[in-house]
Image: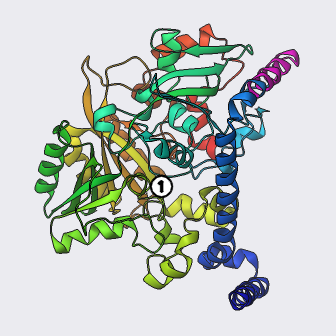
Amino acid sequence: MLGFLLFLLVVFGGAGLWVHLKGIEYVLVHQRWVFVCFFLLPLSVIFDLYHYLRTWIVFQLHSAPKKHDERVRNIQKQVRAWKEDGSRSQMCTARAGWQTMSLRVGKYKQTMRNININLIDILEVDIERQVVRVEPLATMGQVTASLLPLGWTIPVLPELDDLTVGGLICGVGVETSSHHYGLFQHTCEAFELVLADGSLVRCTKDENPDLFYSVPWSHGTLGFLVAAEIKIVHAANFVKVEYKPCHSAEEINKVYTEEVMKKSENDFVEGLMYNENQAVVMTANLTNQAEPGKVNSIGLYYKPWFFKHVESFLKTGPGVEYIPLRHYYHRHTRSIFWELQDIIPFGNNPVFRFLCGWMVPPKVSLLKLTQGETVRQLYEKHHVIQDMLVPLSKMAEALRVFHKEIKLYPLWMCPMLLPSQPGMVHPKGDEDEMYVDIGAYGEPKTLDFDATATTRRLEEYVRSVNGFQMLYADCYMTREEFRQTFDHTLYDKLRTDLGCEKAFPEVFDKICKKNRL
């Protein structure tokens, strides 16, 4: 033990000396992996350990519900103080921009009245009603850690541990079970908000329904979300995953579409596309039993990154394995999908995984906090992080457009049922429609890539097929184009009825590119 501590002292001391000699800016720009491996990974472990212990203690002592009402009253007090001060500027949460999962830091927080929202806990698991009541800053990691030991889970559980309930409701959340349940918002039973006048309101499909359907995608521009009730369903021990490699664009479209439409046969459907003619389509089902020798605990620190593991089936052919449920839920967390390979190029090396894999991944918030202006500009000009939602019937065409514009792989393909309901996002017709989320994360390989021009062409295509853009990403649309994409009918009515014009910016003003730098 002493020898190991001395080894760490020498390594970290040497790294610190090297950084001192080279300069912190040089390391952050040219050798970022050094800073990430020797500083951000240990800090991330400490942060995760503290957060886990705090969450466990609060959940075991049932202390969160007792403090929730007090914290909500404090939020109401802050809003009323804003009114008494003359409502001179609009309001937003005081949560620092670098703490969010989006890679952008919103500058609007510098000019708005910041309201402290310290709501990070799971409040109640109601088995009789089959709902879990949570605060908006509770994360997906907290949800699975709290619910799975009780034998429950939520129907749509997006992969990354640090995604928050509030972000998934007021923004958007999708998972490979969404072809059954819809988006994360469609699994919610109730929302509780503090409005612009400081009042506390609860809304459901039957109680204040206009507000209930308007909160999703509103990005905190109708009020401050302080709690949500989400459906829960029975969990299982494992997920049986079947890997189906495809070797042509036609086969990819055929196999993926067929599996998505077999809703009664597949609990989960996912696709990873590795080039324009190669992809692996995965179907998965909950089960309590696993075949001997076929269990793969993919979430263990020394295991290959999931997207690399999946890619191996292109060579070996179809396969079946059983993944523990929590490992499946967070299968993309360790590699942040595949973004970590650009930060730590040797991160999937077996030696690195064995020695340092237990510290992976670095917190996205810490990556943002330490990236500096030079790195931010590099990401701005040479990096894409986009999720575009298009009708499943247009998937093959959309994939060709993505290939032409960015030639970026892997691509993530996640299906979702989009119900015909009121709100900002719904099918153009009167019937439910199946959509697919095409996720592009990384450095484009097209020679003429221009962040603004290329993204605008993608946005234009998505609009032309009645699709949608996830708004955590860079949005280059004009206000008119934005309103053409997202239905503002009910949203505009609510903003007028609730007196939001003075209190909160519009969604477009909050997410548009010029305000998010």
Where residue 260 sits in the image (x, y, percent)? 20, 42
What residue is rendered at 63% in x and 79% in y? 34
Disc 1 marks which amino acid? Ala
Give whichever of 210, 517 is nearer the camera: 210
What residue is rendered at 33% in x and 38% in y? 178
What residue is rendered at 18% in x and 49% in y? 256
Where residue 492 sits in the image (x, y, percent)? 53, 15
Where residue 510 sits in the image (x, y, percent)? 61, 34
Give whichever of 34, 359 is nearer the camera: 359
Q: Which residue does the numbered mark 1 point to in the structure image?
A: 451
Q: Would residue 465 be visible to someone looking at this image?
A: no
Give left or right: position of 192 versus 412.
right
Occupied quadrant, residue 223: top right
What residue is rendered at 57% in x and 31% in y? 219
Give left or right: position of 400 versus 411.
left
Give left or right: position of 194 versus 219.
right
Give whichever of 516, 293 is nearer the camera: 293
Occupied quadrant, residue 275: bottom left
Establish if 148 lies above or below 75. Answer: below
Where residue 159 sits in the image (x, y, percent)? 44, 50
Q: What is the magenta range?
A: 71-88
